[in-house]
Amino acid sequence: MAVDTDAQDITDEQRAITEMVRQFADEQIIPNAEHYDHEDEFPEPIVEQMRELGLFGVTIPEQYDGMGLDLSTYAMIVEELSRGWISISGIVNTHFIGSYLLMKFGSEEQRQRYLPRMATGELRAAFSLSEPELGSDVQAIKTTAKRTEDGDYEINGQKMWVTNGLRSGLVFTLVRTDPAADPRYRGMTCFICEKEPGAHENTGPYKGLDVPPQIRKMGYKGVESTELVFNGYRTPADSILGGEDAGLNKGFGQMMDALELGRVNVAARGVGIAQRALELALRYSQERRAFGKPIAQHQAIQFKLADMATQVEAARLLTRRAARLKDAGVRSDIEAGMAKLFASEAGHFCVEESLRIHGGYGYSKEYEIERLYRDAPLLLIGEGTSEIQRMVIGRKLLERHKI
């Protein structure tokens, strides 16, 4: 019951890929999501199939064994995965940000070392900004990296809300390397921190990086969200993104660049969950009867469906525009912020309206909309809250139109 997108400006290749992923979502993700959500269990069989489909290497260039597709196509894939279950899209989200950081800022040695294994999903990546005492104020980061006498760096501190924090083999981690820097963002560096996938307590060369038990959440289950504890973790200077000469104290700008993509990603997830909520509402409203006829024939329900469908289409268009601008190499901070703001709010709106249409049954775990209702609020927070998006959009608008 997906909305027809044939009239939209997409290529034959994009249509073929999205149809393949939609079929995968219909056949493998949606029928199994309830089980993994209920058990809060990592969906390993589904992830293995994603590896076989090449979904971990969608944007990685062919020379590193990836598909070499653009952000616009990736956003369409994320929409379809999120339509199935946003936890599945979360598994590839931080991995995608990591591969982007490597492709744009990494040294050729780093690209050769990591990207081929990332393309196959053999090596998966995480992305870490937040800390227990900070969220939106990235410049307040306390985790530090200090150069040792033998030329390595020692990292100490604690990170929070790391998606894929346990099973990843790489964590792109923003830390403070120059505490005296003014402004503060000039003293931050991104390290490519290697770790043992699946290990709560790392040993050997990765000693000093521990992963506490995953954070228990209202929704967004199945994919782990964890803390990372750095306690004397040693890493070589060439683990700085881009190398020490090119990357030292350049991490803040690198991470902010990557967040534009992260916001397009969250926007696509908002479109996906909104689309699924609309599909469920369309189906249920035509099956459920009240006062002698299907509730879809009542004007109040039709108004809800109309508002939902309009928000889905508007969110999709904003998301694809932001992705196209990024693909064209155009700064898209405003557009990515707009897409993330509108699509995440649209996702939450459509899910709540769909639950209202389901009535009491929507509150039951027997119906899929109950899971969507727990998942949707995450999108209002991840990659910057709606309030942060408005601040970014407003500030950047004034910069662009300064008089």
Image (cartoon, grey):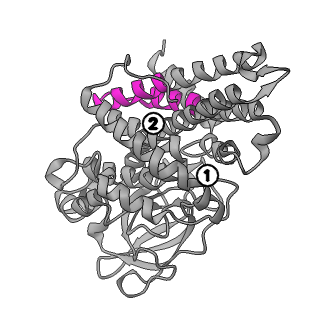
Question: Residue placed at 52% from the left, 36% from the top?
Answer: 272
The mark lying in front, picked from 2 and 1, is: 2
Question: As drawn, which residue projects farthest toward the right?
Answer: 291
* Dominant SS in magenta: helix
- Percent x, y of residue 203: 42, 86
Query: Does 368 appear in magenta?
Result: no
Q: Nearer the viewer, residue 206 or 167?
A: 167
- Percent x, y of residue 385: 62, 40
Question: Residue placed at 49% from the left, 51% from the top?
Answer: 29
Marks 2 and 1, Cα distance to the nearest angstrom? 19 Å
Query: Does 328 appear in magenta?
Result: yes
As shown in the figure, which amino acid type bears the numbered disc 1?
Gly
As shown in the figure, which amino acid type bears the numbered disc 2?
Val
Mark number, residue 264? 2
Regarding residue 173, the answer to whether it shows in the image is: no
Q: Residues within 10 Å of mark 2 (few under 14, many from 20)?
A: many
The magenta segment is 316-343
Q: Is residue 91 above or below residue 328?
A: below
Residue underneath mark 1: 135
Q: Earlier in the sequence, mark 2 or mark 1?
A: 1
Question: As drawn, which residue projects farthest toward the left?
Answer: 63
Q: Residues within 10 Å of mark 1 (few under 14, many from 20)?
A: some
- Percent x, y of residue 118: 29, 60
Q: Nearer the viewer, residue 26 or 341?
A: 26
Pointers 2 and 1 in contact (C-beta within 8 Å): no
- Percent x, y of residue 196: 40, 77
Q: Is residue 302 above or below residue 383?
A: above
- Secondary structure found at label 2: helix
